[in-house]
Image: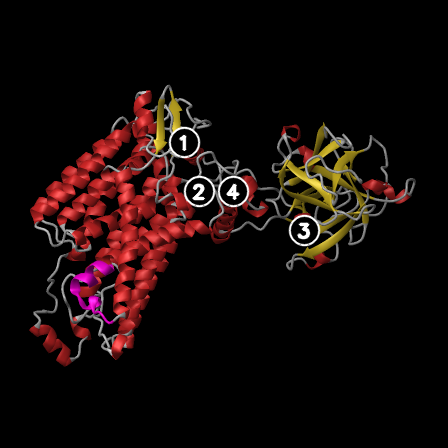
Amino acid sequence: MSGGVRVRRPTSPPPGLPQMAPQRFPHLRHDHLDADARKEAASKGYVPGRRTHAPGGLNITPGEWKLLGVVVILAMCVRLFRISQPDSVVFDEVHFGKFASKYIKSQYFVDVHPPLAKLLITLAGFVFGYDGNFDFKDIGKAYEHVPFVAMRLVPAFMGVATVPISYLTLRALDCRATTAMLASLFITFENGLVTQSRHILLDSPLVFFTALTVLLWTGFCNEDKHEPFTEMWWTWLVLSGLSLGAVVSCKWVGLFTIATVGFSTIKQLWTLLGDLRVSSKVFMRHFMARAACLIGIPILFYMFMFWIHFLILQNPGDGDGFMSSEFQHTLNGRGMADTYADVALGSTITLRHVNTQGGYLHSHSHTYPTGSQQQQITLYPHRDENNVWRILNATREGDPTHDWANQPLTYVTPGMHIKLQHIVTDKHLHSHEQRPPVSEVEYQNEVSGYGIPNYPGDANDDWVVEIAHGDKRDKESSKRLRTLRTHLRLRHVMTGCYLFSHKVKLPDWGFEQQEVTCNKQAIKENSLWYIETSAHPKLPQDAPKVNYKLPGFLSKFLELQQVMWATNAGLTDRHTFDSRPDSWPRMRRGINFWVRDHRQIYLLGNPMVWWLSTAAVLCYVAVRAFLILRAKRGYRDFENTKVVKYDTLCGFLFVGWSLHYFPFYLMGRQLFLHHYFPALYFAILLSCGVFDLVTSALKPKVRLQVAGVLLVIAIWNFVYLSPIAYGNTWTKSKCENARWLRTWDFAW
């Protein structure tokens, strides 16, 4: 401090959670105090066992409850108005409606989002008789025999429930009733939140559980300041943990909510650690309680949602190809009989790729349209007779050992030269100095099926077996080829390239199957193969057999998390209506959801609510920086109880906004305006917190009038842009006049 003046700063409540009343003994129960402290507590009016505050700080009068009930009814009218229109698929209902169909049919699928919100939507469809037979294929496709209204009601009612939650949250944060009511009405008439909540989409459940978590955590923090370790204290803490589990089980964006609560928790524990009156034993109780409820419970809840997910999805589906072979064999009908462990010359085998979800080496009687125009070799994810090959000894023509049927049983060992004969078409696996049709680069060679019946083949059919590694459970698997236990590479004798596949799809002429090439610079992981099935007429019935080791729940859970992460990171393609985070606070553009007959549903926020919330964020940053600068100059603003209250309140909401917004800058994946909605919720509450501060010196009547003016402007904005929220008809001139920014690309 300037001039060497030491400024004593008061102990502040947890971030964003204002002191309900000055208190000398935060975080302490009466039996944790020494004798002198008990006397002082008694002199302050503290009586052990007597509750002197409302649970969670929710001091709501009966009149407020009645008024809040009216607002909830208003929110229902706004969100449920003409919810049956349009009666066709809207935007991402294409995906989430389709997932509901797969749940009902128990067909396995893979999505980048956790299951909770999708399960709730599916439950509504199931209860109202949906049989899962609608394909949700295209935006605009008319619904037939689908209870889509019931399915839309799930996010709609969650959108409605967010309204009273916002009110209760600000009241728990010690804001005035007028402020809380303004926030609830802002959310009621926020066009973007309304539009998003009226369709079979996941963002409304996400925002609901985000808001619920903030309310429950605020209630816990208020309880913690008065009487920790009481029954009510544990209730708020456990419910906070359950809500954290729910929000992250809707979308991974819920991790940002966990981070928000985590920052507040660290601040609480840091305050406790610095309080010399708190014994080590009491501190550890606080630490362990928070760890169990805010880490353990969310993890268990999240895993439980996936347990339900696996329990329902027991049949094969289009998501099989994303999972490992072991995982796939846990699905109904995908299990296989035990197969011979030994692989010998003359064995008929199926060969699977290790690194790209285990597709089978495949061929069929179709040729490449360019290059050699020989028979196609692909990677195919499903079982098929065209996946079967026979291992032959690659020897000179006329060598008697080529006749495997009349020779002794010879196991395949490292370094052996072999040919692979396609059983159905009698072609050999072949490569040559010819560029493949898709990956036309110098280090890639075409792989094809070549030859005619009874043709012994040529040198370009020859491959060298290289064993990469074996299974520790099978000691022989590193010495010779063993089914399921050995990972091998096949090196082309003539060119030195390796049999290779990667996540590149062939065009329509290749049936969009995966490309197989021979790569001279092959990444090892993409050139690894294993034999799934093996049969040989000379092997006795009692010869050793093997099968997949089926994974348990934990293994399946961890594998699916990896697949979801990789799939999410791979969503890098551009979309017509995608946007980047820098444009969201300014609401530069929206998203076209649906259009037909001069009617359009276009996701766009309420300009007044949206821009006011952004201004509040900037205002907080500016004022906080100014206060820090003043503190450096020796001013004692942070000893003012009013400054402390609003700094902690707004600081908590600002941290929530920041943690739900800035991480998107680190993502290279496809992003849309609706990814900003959780951050928008914090920004709206922050704008109302700023309103509470700015109007704190005004008379209640004047404050109410100011709030009324803001509300009238917000409602006018909502009504003016409501045609694109509800898909109503409007004139071309009104449409043009409503395009306030050139980047708003909705059209008449």
**Residue that badge 2 annotates:** 671
Label 1 vs label 3: CA separation?
A: 39 Å
Q: Amino acid at mark 1?
A: Phe
First reached walking from the N terminus: tag 2 or tag 3: 3
Q: In the figure, residue 739 lies in which quadrant?
A: top left
Q: Nearer the viewer, mark 1 or mark 2?
A: 2
Q: How many labels sit on residues?
A: 4
Horizontal side, residue 520 vs residue 274: left or right:
right
On residue 523, which mark appears?
A: 3
On residue 91, which mark appears?
A: 1
Look at 12% across and 41% down and name the residue there: 67
Q: Nearer the viewer, residue 474 or 139?
A: 139
On residue 148, which mark appears?
A: none
Colour logic: secondary structure
Label 1 vs label 2: CA separation?
A: 15 Å
Q: Nearer the viewer, mark 1 or mark 4?
A: 4
- Is 426 above or below relative to 610? above
Q: Which residues are magenta?
A: 634-648
**Residue that badge 4 annotates:** 572
User: Is residue 241 shown to the viewer in this render?
Assistant: no
First reached walking from the N terminus: tag 4 or tag 2: 4
Horizontal side, residue 475 vs residue 695: left or right:
right
